[in-house]
Image (cartoon, coloured by chain):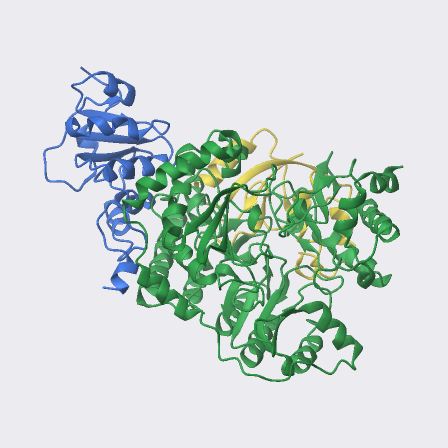
Chain colours: A yellow, B blue, C green
């Protein structure tokens, strides 16, 4: 699937396009199909996202979304060296998902 | 003759001179060196401003083009001309934003023709950003170091 | 230490307001990201993997306790309770909001700090010897000249849109503790025929094309220092390549023109510049010198009680000989075994500030190796200082050892990175500490970069590690034989890369080769230079 991501202009938070809005959680991401460029241009112009781009990802059996590249998996979760600052601080196995 | 190089005087948004605005008719640096009657010339980023030094007397306008604001060669070109005693109009044209104005002014530009008209209020604030300055340039302002030891 | 006058304060305050206005225009949509990016970068504001990152300048690595305290407070108030000290003697916050950035700059301005030109294609923070003004072996304190350069380079109207970033370093000792020749301009203050002047090295750097700066002028009189620097910059601004980002640094210009031709052009420009009167008045350098006059050192005990072996080890490892024989410079290691190199919490920053007030005439320094220095500590106070450091987890006795690893933020934080640097540093320090090999290996500088940009100085590591992306997997290239010191050299790649576990084993193998081959008190680097790459290759790939 193709997924749209970027950072929130004001806060810098990593955000994912759900199909109708932006979410901080990668699992909320929706497949943008061929419409990625169009949504990207519209959302950037509206300043709802900064430096957006389209990535490859896969929908796993449990419904979660896994970006194809390690860099976007780091973005999705947080720094591997500070599990306490990731989006899943209480899940010790979350880091395995990145690598 | 219509010259695609020149900007129209009515596009000069900011001008810090009292003399009459020079109309169209700028030529390239190469052409200026070849023909002896040109009074207005346009410098592109890769041109050597020093090639103009022997013609400065006859020039009334030098335009310095900034195809991209991030290409800073025009700042050196401007200072070189002013350091050599050029007193005619030095006009910055092209991709010029509010945030370049004060530095351009400090390097000797006294006219500005941005591709896109700038917000007057933002521009006024930008020209007035620095009450004092650290570097000696060609704008005649005393430096902070000089003011400290007056 | 330098103290702002009303002019300096007004400049920094004006910059805060200018940036506040730029951020407002960005948020209102008057500036696109393409227009805003160079402006925010020139204020040290990056967009990284997780958030905005703010890089705060610590000019020539010197700061006082009030400044360090505010750095800690900002970490707690606007970030997530910590900051990262960098190889450019700066501090980075990783979790910044654009809407807070101007307020942070305003907080910094209250203690005479800023983020001016900590990024962007302009003249960056001036770096210097972290032992400046304290070390036994320096000619003069280089910091008045670093401050002169700081002021000259701040908002320089001609050199704000250079082809690429530009880094200047000033030292005044034969020993190079600041990687001087790996800067765009390295200035070494020297004595020649009884006069003091500046030796200029131009065109060094790391990145994807590492080069050692050649000397272009043996002696520039100090009252022409700014004029000469201005000439070096003008030639670069006019003729540096702008067609290819990767060939835009001054090292490429100097290399392509040749040192002689570049020098000729600089000399021509310099002769012209001398008539322009760009040099600040002599009285100004006299004024700056007064700020860096040595503090009132007192005679005291010159020896100490070494009965506590832990303390004795720390003293041997982490202190440096001072110009006054009753003092030393003490290094606070930010490299606890298994820790994140260069990271310090807000509490640790405030503690270091408190210790500087108590024991070091209120002064601290940041090292390019991502540690902190208390430059003037009485030998008599060392034990008390060490006790407090040790209790706070800041007493690691490992300066210049294999545990004292330089590591860039890498793929855990940086949007440019290809691989993670920090986990490697953590695991390597843990491995060598657990095996008790650190002390035996002695001075061994290991440096890790997470990408070709080389922020982790891997080219200059006795052992260097470069992280690359190999078909979507992290991969690490090992190199040997680099040095950033006065014996400067560039490391050479050993051969094919390794995965994370593999490169840790590889580091251990090369250290074993060293231990087997070393003669006398040779360092790893000395042995490598004597025996060459072959035995190491054999151990790794044979």
Examine the rendered structure and indicate whether residue A46 appears above or below residue B5: below
Q: Nearer the viewer, residue C362 or C183?
A: C183
Quarter of the image that includes the N terminus of chain C: bottom left
**Left or right: C378, with C245 as reference point:** right
Q: Position of residue C86 (x, y in %)?
A: 59, 56
Q: Position of residue C119 (x, y in %)?
A: 49, 49
- The image quadrant that residue C496 belongs to is top right
Q: Total marks drawn?
A: 0
Q: Would residue B122 be found to the left or right of residue C405 on screen?
A: left
Quick check: can you spot residue A49? no
Residue drawn at (60%, 57%), measured in percent from left and top?
Answer: C175
User: Viewed as shown, does residue C183 lie left or right of C25?
Assistant: right
| Residue C367 place in picture, x, y as percent | 59, 61
Q: Nearer the viewer, residue B109 or C34?
A: B109
Name the foreground residue: A87 vs B17: B17
For residue C462, say whether it is visible. Answer: yes
Please identify the residue farthest to the front as the structure is shown: C193
Which part of the image, by quadrant, shows the C terminus of chain C? top right
Left or right, C200 with respect to C480, comes to: left
């Amino acid at each position: 699937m193709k997924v749209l991501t970027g950072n929130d202009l004001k806060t810098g938070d990593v955000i994912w396009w759900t199909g109708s809005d932006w979410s901080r959680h990668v699992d909320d991401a929706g497949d943008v199909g061929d419409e990625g460029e169009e949504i990207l241009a519209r959302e950037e112009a509206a300043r709802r996202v900064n430096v957006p781009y389209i990535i490859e990802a896969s929908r796993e059996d449990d419904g979660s979304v896994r970006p194809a590249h390690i860099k976007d998996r780091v973005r999705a979760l947080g720094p591997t060296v500070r599990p306490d600052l990731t989006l899943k601080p209480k899940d010790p196995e979350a880091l395995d998902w990145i690598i | 003759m219509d010259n695609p190089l020149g900007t129209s005087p009515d596009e000069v948004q900011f001008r810090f001179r009292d003399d009459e605005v020079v109309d169209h008719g700028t030529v390239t640096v190469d052409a200026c060196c070849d023909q002896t009657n040109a009074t207005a010339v346009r410098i592109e980023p890769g041109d050597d401003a020093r090639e103009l030094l022997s013609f400065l007397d006859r020039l009334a306008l030098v335009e310095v083009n900034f195809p991209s604001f991030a290409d800073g060669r025009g700042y050196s070109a401007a200072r070189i001309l002013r350091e050599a005693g050029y007193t005619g109009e030095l006009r910055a044209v092209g991709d010029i934003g509010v945030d370049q104005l004060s530095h351009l002014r400090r390097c000797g530009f006294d006219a500005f023709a941005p591709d896109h008209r700038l917000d007057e209020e933002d521009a006024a604030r930008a020209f007035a950003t620095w009450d004092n300055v650290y570097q000696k340039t060609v704008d005649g302002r005393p430096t902070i170091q000089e003011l400290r030891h007056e | 230490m330098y103290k702002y006058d009303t002019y300096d304060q007004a400049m920094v305050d004006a910059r805060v307001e200018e940036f506040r206005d730029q951020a407002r225009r960005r948020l209102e949509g008057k500036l696109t990201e393409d227009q805003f990016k160079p402006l925010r970068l020139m204020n040290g504001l990056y967009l990284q993997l997780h958030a905005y990152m703010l890089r705060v300048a610590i000019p020539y690595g010197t700061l006082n306790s009030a400044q360090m305290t505010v750095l800690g407070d900002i970490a707690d108030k606007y970030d997530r309770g910590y900051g990262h000290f960098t190889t450019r003697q700066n501090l980075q916050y990783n979790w910044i909001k654009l809407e807070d950035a101007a307020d942070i700059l305003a907080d910094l301005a209250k203690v005479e700090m800023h983020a001016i030109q900590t990024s962007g294609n302009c003249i960056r923070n001036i770096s210097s010897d972290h032992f400046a003004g304290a070390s036994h072996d320096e000619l003069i304190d280089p910091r008045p000249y670093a401050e002169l350069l700081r002021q000259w380079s701040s908002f320089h109207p001609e050199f704000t849109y250079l082809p690429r970033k530009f880094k200047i370093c000033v030292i005044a000792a034969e020993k190079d503790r600041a990687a001087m020749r790996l800067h765009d301009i390295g200035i070494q203050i020297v004595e020649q025929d009884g006069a003091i002047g500046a030796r200029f090295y131009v065109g060094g750097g790391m990145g994807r094309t590492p080069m050692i700066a050649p000397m272009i002028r043996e002696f520039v009189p100090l009252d022409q220092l700014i004029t000469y620097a201005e000439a070096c910059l003008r030639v670069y601004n006019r003729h540096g390549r702008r067609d290819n980002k990767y060939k835009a640094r001054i090292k490429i210009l100097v290399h392509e023109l040749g040192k002689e031709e570049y020098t000729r052009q600089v000399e021509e420009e310099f002769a012209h510049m001398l008539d322009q009167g760009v040099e600040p008045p002599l009285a100004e350098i006299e004024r700056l010198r007064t700020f860096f006059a040595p503090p009132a050192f007192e005679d005291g005990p010159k020896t100490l009680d070494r009965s506590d072996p832990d303390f004795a080890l720390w003293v041997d490892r982490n202190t440096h000989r001072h110009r006054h024989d009753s003092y030393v410079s003490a290094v606070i290691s930010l490299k606890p075994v298994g820790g994140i190199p260069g990271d310090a919490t807000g509490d640790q920053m405030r503690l270091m500030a408190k210790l500087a007030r108590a024991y070091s005439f209120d002064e601290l320094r940041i090292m390019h190796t991502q540690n902190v220095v208390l430059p003037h500590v009485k030998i008599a106070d060392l034990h008390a200082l060490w006790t407090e450091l040790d209790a706070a987890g800041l007493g690691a006795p490992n300066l210049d050892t294999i545990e004292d690893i330089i590591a860039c933020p890498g793929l855990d934080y940086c949007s440019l990175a290809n691989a993670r640097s920090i986990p490697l540093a953590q695991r390597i320090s843990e491995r060598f500490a657990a095996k008790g090999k650190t002390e035996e290996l002695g001075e061994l500088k290991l440096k890790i970069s997470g990408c070709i940009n080389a922020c982790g100085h891997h080219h200059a590591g006795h052992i260097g590690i470069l992280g690359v992306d190999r078909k979507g997997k992290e991969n690490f290239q090992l190199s040997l034989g680099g040095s950033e010191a006065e014996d400067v050299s560039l490391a050479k790649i050993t051969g094919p890369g390794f995965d994370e576990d593999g490169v840790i084993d590889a580091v251990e193998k090369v250290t074993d080769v060293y231990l087997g081959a070393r003669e006398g008190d040779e360092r790893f680097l000395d042995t490598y230079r004597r025996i060459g790459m072959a035995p190491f290759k054999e151990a790794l790939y044979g």
